[in-house]
Image (cartoon, grey):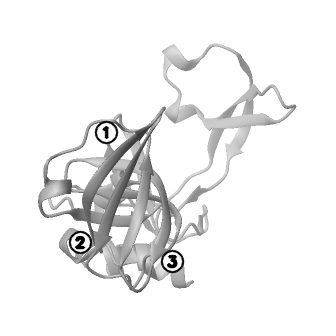
Amino acid sequence: MKLDDLPNFKATRREDHGDQVHLFGRFDDLAHVVDSRSWLLTATEAYCGDLEEVDLESQTAIFKSWDDEFIPKLFDSGIGWMHGRYNPSDVWKVLDQSSVWLEAMFRESDAIARDLEDGWRELTSVDAVRVSDSEGLLSIVPNGWDHEHCFICNIHIDADEPKCYTSPFGNGNLYWVCPLCYSQWIEPHDIGFIYAQMRG
């Protein structure tokens, strides 16, 4: 599945409502479309909003967004719609054929603990902390970073996992993916996982 296979939403009218813009429009296909927090996206642009009032007969809906400027294509031919379970960067990362994914084995590492206002403690891998982020650090927790999550299926990637795959993106944060998701989605650059997880 590629971006062109997503349900296409073409906006036909715009209404400004305070800090929200309501886009009235029509879908070409409602197979996976539900009222929800969601995204309208292209290969380079994304708009977050709440999809409401999906009408199965007319295939119309209202997309309520906090953005106030949109690319002309949204009104001319329409752009893809995606449920909000994933972020556009997840989709773009999988589709990016220039991405370099390296086979890796997860290793436990120390974590840095930070107190939160609600009484919880936030842990961050020592490897991911930048000096500029060090304000308010509480303590170092030996071997406190004991797993990652596959960004597609969310399973734990632990030290006993025989292998996994990693790839940097954007500000240098690592994407972690399990072997099954790597072979099923990453290698073929297939974004069908966004619907597979909705069914699961």
Q: Residue 197 shows which numbered tag?
A: 3
Where residue 82 appears, x then y in whole percent?
38, 66
* Secondary structure of the residue carrying numbered label 2: loop
Q: Quadrant of the C terminus?
A: bottom right
Q: Amino acid at mark 2?
A: His
Residue visible at 71% across and 42% down? Answer: 144
Inter-mark Cα distance, 3 to 1: 24 Å
Where 49 sits versus 190, above or below?
above
- Residue 121 in the image: above or below residue 90: above
Q: Give how far apart the Cα atoms at labels 2 and 1 are.
A: 18 Å
- Mark 3 or mark 2, which is nearer the start of the sequence? 2
Residue at the spot x=50%, y=34% of the render? 128
Q: Quadrant of the N terminus?
A: bottom left
| Residue assigned mark 1 | 170
Residue 105, given in percent of the width and then of the height, sits at 47, 60
Residue at label 2?
Answer: 189
**Residue type highlighted by circle 3:** Gln
Question: What's the residue at 46%, 82% (across, down)?
Answer: 196
Image coordinates of residue 103 in percent, x first then y, are 35, 63
Nearer the observer: mark 3 or 1; the answer is 3
Residue 189 picture location, percent across and down: 23, 71
